[in-house]
Amino acid sequence: MADFGPELRLSSPRTDGTNAQQEPAGRRPMNFTTGEILALVGVGVFLGGIVAAYMIISRKKGWM
């Protein structure tokens, strides 16, 4: 689990030492990365659901 930390945190240009100093003591990089992934997936599903609902509603209005 610890080996995936540096590979998944490619978006941050800081080194591990700088991240360790700025982040809280109880917070791990893996938790932050997992939270980012869950947030991105949640936003994607949310936007996808809105687009799908809009398409279905517009189709029903067009046929009616």
Image (tube, rainbow, N blue to C red):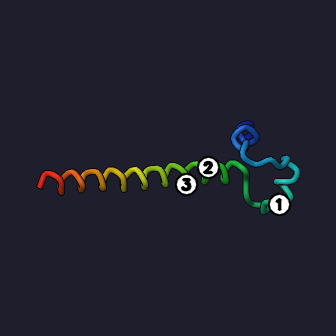
Between 28 and 52, the one lying in front of the other is 52
Q: Percent x, y for residue 57? A: 24, 56
Q: Percent x, y for residue 64? A: 11, 56
User: Which residue position holds label 1?
Assistant: 22
Query: Which mark is drawn over residue 45?
Result: none
Q: Three-letter amino acid code at disc 3?
A: Ala
Residue at 61%, 52% (x, y): give it.
Answer: 36
The secondary structure type at the circle numbered 3 is helix
Residue at 83%, 54% (x, y): give it.
Answer: 20
User: Which residue position holds label 2?
Assistant: 34
- Residue 3's place in the image compared with 37, above or below, is above
Residue at 80%, 47% (x, y): give it.
Answer: 13
Label total for image: 3
Compute the Cα span from label 3 to label 2: 9 Å
Between 39 and 26, the one lying in front of the other is 39
User: Which residue position holds label 3?
Assistant: 39
**Structural crowding at the residue carrying mark 3, measured as other residues with C-alpha within 10 Å and reported as few (<14), some (14–19) or many (≥20):** few
Residue farthest front in this picture: 62
**Structural crowding at the residue carrying mark 1, measured as other residues with C-alpha within 10 Å and reported as few (<14), some (14–19) or many (≥20):** few
The secondary structure type at the circle numbered 1 is helix
